Image: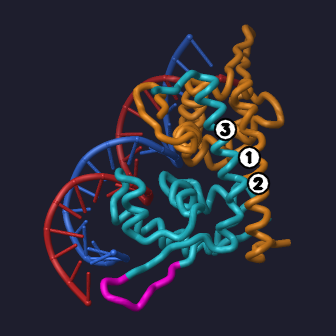
Chain colours: A cyan, B orange, C blue, D red
Amino acid sequence: MYELNGEEFFCPMQVTLHILNDKWKLFIVYSLLDGAKRFKEICDTFPSITQKTVSIKLKELEASQMITRTVYAQVPPKVEYALSATGKKIEPMVKAMYEFGLFYVKQHGCEKQ
Amino acid sequence: MYELNGEEFFCPMQVTLHILNDKWKLFIVYSLLDGAKRFKEICDTFPSITQKTVSIKLKELEASQMITRTVYAQVPPKVEYALSATGKKIEPMVKAMYEFGLFYVKQHGCEKQ
DNA sequence: CAGTATCCTCATCGATACTG
DNA sequence: CAGTATCGATGAGGATACTG
């Protein structure tokens, strides 16, 4: 049995899904595996996500200690988001997800030119 | 570039998330790793999910070829859901998610008696 | 550049009841 | 047992505009 800010979980899987299971978070942490990104870069990485959603998701990921937020005191402002030590631990998981996707599209002949 | 019933994807990760990223699907396929389950068993595994949602999610998972549905001609009816060959390929991914959750709760001291 | 503030839509999910 | 039908709540996320 585990507890995370008031909520109870019976299985580590549940914890993982609690932290990452939504439409965007996994994409965001995935894109940060290459290295730190600025707010605008993250927005540009996914054209179909809005600034507002990016903002919310980054806050949530920061709250669950998956990413760090670094503000550079300059004008114009520069803020960088990067995976925390904990966040970097997603790598094997993300790799496995990538591999599965690769297998799936091959299996189902979903490739296009 | 990949295509799945009309939608376009640029990355295998995107495909994986398209198939599995919602509140329940990962839990369901996860619970099927032990072996086939009947409809009621799946409902009972997750007390906080409704029959309706289970029904919808099973249909979606079947449509994306992740699970198989076997009807036994008997009264009362018996229907079994099991992972397909494709579905079984989630195992490394799920293991990685489990491991991450485990790491996370240890790191953050979330264990309760 | 890096966000907030509003307003709004729409899918997801829950509650409950009913059926072959 | 294995669902479907109906209705309703809710909240994530989109569109757009604005700010330090």
Tell me the residue at 55%/46% (across/down). B22
Cβ–Cβ under 8 Å for marks 3 and 2: no
Residue D13: x and y in percent read 38, 54
Tell me the residue at 58%/54% (across/down). A21
Residue B98 — which label? 2
Count of labels in the image? 3
Q: CA distance from mark 3 to mark 2?
A: 16 Å
Picture quarter with the C terminus of chain B: bottom right
Cβ–Cβ under 8 Å for marks 2 and 1: yes
Residue B94 — which label? 1
Mark 2 is on which residue type?
A: Tyr
Mark 3 is on which residue type?
A: Phe
Q: Assess disc 3: are there few (<14), some (14-19) or many (≥20) residues with their C-alpha within 10 Å of its C-alpha.
A: many
The chain letter for the residue carrying disc 2 is B
Mark 1 is on which residue type?
A: Val
As drawn, is A44 to the left or to the right of B96? left
Q: Which residues are magenta?
A: A69-77
Q: Nearer the viewer, residue C16 or B21?
A: B21
Q: Nearer the viewer, residue B10 or A21?
A: B10
Residue A6: x and y in percent read 64, 73
Can you tell which of label 1 and label 3 is closer to the viewer? 3
Whether residue A10 is visible to the viewer of this picture, yes or no, is no
Tell me the residue at 52%/40% (across/down). B18
> Is residue A107 covered in magenta?
no
Residue tagged by mark 3? A100
> What secondary structure is marked by label 3?
helix
